[in-house]
Image (cartoon, rainbow, N blue to C red):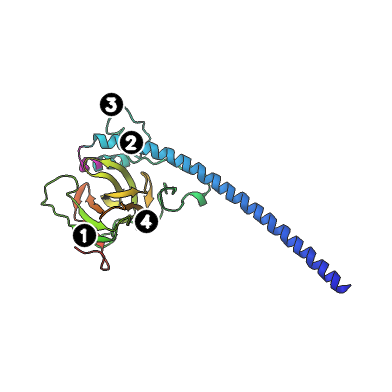
Amino acid sequence: MESLAEVRREIIDTHLALDRAAKQRSTAAQEIASLIDAKAALLAQTREAQQQADARAAALAAQAKDMRDLLDRLATAEKQGGGAQKIKPAEEDTDQALLAAPRPAQPQVPNSTAVATIGPQAIPLLERPALIRPFPNSPGGLFMPARGRIARLFDPSVESGPLSKGMVIQTLPSAQVVAPFDGHVVFQGPFRGYGSILIIEHADGYNTLLSGLGRIDAAVGQWLLAGEPVGVMSSDGTPELYVELRRASQPIDPLPWLKISGDKVKG
């Protein structure tokens, strides 16, 4: 009888534990469903903001005469506080109306869903992180944006033109490309002779320009940390990544600023 009573107590305890586990699973499922809904809402608002940013970027690219002009316009837009203004038809465009780096309003969703995994389906980090650092005050403080062989160095004597004010890195097919330093994406899209480009604005008037990617995974308005993936190279042949570093819109040699290590990066 005592053994039977003990078995009954164990059965009751087991049922109680199962009930508690079921309630916990139900609560967790509700929380997961809520987070999924919040992420979907954030993605929808982010996509809308990105579509507006893409439209402004396209209008700005159509008006800018060259890369220096484009960067100057981007800097002006940043000082004016983002893209709250509506784009006008091309014949009515003004410098103030062409804002390529809008700051989309933050959706009111839980903080835990503000950032997703890196990749095409990621939710960009649209609010300036506290970790963003000032630009290094000495060379060697930037990540190489991709591993590969340096195929062409910066040469200020080269005739002016697209893809002549930076360096070229030959990479493996589908190589990962990362942000060389903390910054803010201010432009993403095609531009005169450069193909599809990504421009990251750093602190202290520095900008990095990347061209030649097979796919860009960063969006206008997104904040990036050094080493964060921003895209991948083409899967065909020997892809080449073009890298420019500019300060106050003027091109400077990026090589001294890049942290080169290992045997994979050679001239």
Q: Which residue is pictured at 25% across the width and 41% down the height?
A: 191
In whole angstroms, how far apart are the C-alphas of marks 1 and 4? Answer: 21 Å
Which badge, 4 or 3, comes first in the chain's sequence?
A: 3
Can you tell which of label 1 and label 4 is closer to the viewer?
Answer: 1
Of the residues shown, which amino acid type is indicated by label 1? Ile
256 w.r.t. 114: above or below: below
For mark 1, what is the residue? 150
Of the residues shown, which amino acid type is indicated by label 2? Arg
For mark 3, what is the residue? 92
Of the residues shown, which amino acid type is indicated by label 3? Glu
In magenta stretch: residue 81: no
Q: Which residue is pictured at 20% across the width and 37% down the height?
A: 65
Q: Residue 77: x and y, percent?
A: 31, 39
For mark 4, what is the residue? 228
In whole angstroms, how far apart are the C-alphas of marks 1 and 3? Answer: 44 Å
Can you tell which of label 1 and label 3 is closer to the viewer?
Answer: 1
How many numbered tags mark residues here?
A: 4
Q: Are the residues tagged 4 and 3 within 8 Å (C-beta)? A: no
- Stretch in magenta: 65-70
Q: Quadrant of the C terminus?
A: bottom left
